[in-house]
Image (spheres, grey):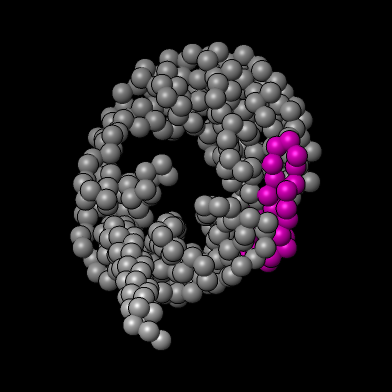
Amino acid sequence: MNRRARLLLGCSFVLLAALAAGTAWALWERSVRDDRRPVLVGNRLVSLRTGAVLRTFDEDWWGALPDKNRPGVFSLDRLTIDTETNSVTETPGAHGPWITLTDGNAIACVDSSERALWRTALPDAPSSFGPDYQLLEVGSLVLVGSIDHLRALDRWNGHELWRSPGGGRYPCVSGDVVLASTGKTLVARSLATGTEVFRCDEPGTVTGIEAIDGKFVVTGMFPPSFTRVHDRQGALLLDLPVDAAYVDSTPEGLFVVSSKGFAHYRFPAGLVWRSVEPTVAGRSEWVGLVHLEGGGVIALSGSHGELDLIRLDAQGKGLWRTRCEPAEVEGGNGYSHGVYTEVRGDHLVVVNQSSVASYIEVLGLATGKKRRRFTYPPR
């Protein structure tokens, strides 16, 4: 090999070494950047890299609630905490006033000292409130649903704006329509006037209504059990698995978790794929989905502090599954859980907040392998 060739070969090795070093540096820097922002575990602000408690907030509430639209922003009782800027502000409305049902068949607006600012009687109310009354605050309106009526009150003075007969159980708002039920019948009304928009019958007694991406997901039982999706005009779009434990909507369509597996639906095509990967949704107290860039989801379901996770690709094929063990053995009652997740670079952060004991687990996004775990005792 002549001198020129040896020189070129040496330069190539130098360039490859520099490229490798640059790639390693970039990956390390991204890893550090991904881990730089702390996480909130209950009232503790915690370093994701070391698990050290950086700050403790003097709040009684055990679980921090993440803002779905602002990564790194949390609500903790009366505080709003931004972990990116390390700023803490008081949440608007933290000191009231609040709308509440009171004894004596009435609804009231009370301030932080429990003084009633206004009180409105509900003459058609039974003697015991129980589950026959649901309140829903929508902007300046308070919707009051009962067995045989739905009414709207002005939030600021309690004056009745409209009243509509026909049942008002499980009121739910999507756009300018409020949907409620009476037994097996759904009744949709104009939010502004209470005028009936449509009504339709379901196969069983309605036990819940949820608004997802401009549509209504209606569940029911007694018998038969059902989960159905309607649009705001009342048209039936989908008939989902009867034991759907969780329904989530993205621009890609609806994702459904049930005890039989996972399914992905689109409108108006219907079923896109169904996965028979086993779940524990039927016995879970908490179910959630993490949607990933490029398609695919991570499904989480758990009970008594443990979480089962499974990653599916964009076609519903299982890539990995793992389990996060509880931080402490827990009894059957008397505790609460709050779970949230964050995708940071090439790893998934799982935070399980509990009134008994909490933990953070950092998992590899590609493999589900545990990278770090930190546990924290009760407050």
Name the residue at 70% across, 45% down.
Answer: 265
Residue at 75% in and 47% down: 271
Is residue 356 placed above or below 77 in the rendered structure? below
Q: Is residue 297 visible?
A: yes
Based on the picture, tell me whether residue 7 belongs to the magenta stretch: no
Q: Taking 124 as reference, is 374 left or right?
A: left
Q: Is residue 306 left or right of residue 8?
A: right
In the image, residue 2 lies at what x, y percent?
Answer: 38, 84
Q: Report the magenta residues as a range.
A: 257-285
Nearer to us in this view, 125 or 218: 218
Residue at x-position 33% and y-position 75%? 11
Residue 181, located in which quarter of the rendered image?
top right
Does the magenta segment cover residue 260? yes
Q: Which of 370/241 is in front?
A: 370
Tally of numbered discs: 0
Q: Quadrant of the N terminus?
A: bottom left
Vertical position of residue 64 compared to residue 1: above or below: above
Q: Position of residue 67 (x, y in %)?
A: 38, 45
Relative to the observer, which residue lies in front, 326 or 294? 294
Residue at position x 67%, y 58% in the image: 316
Residue 143 location (% of width, % of height): 50, 25
In this picture, is 59 found above or below 11? Answer: above
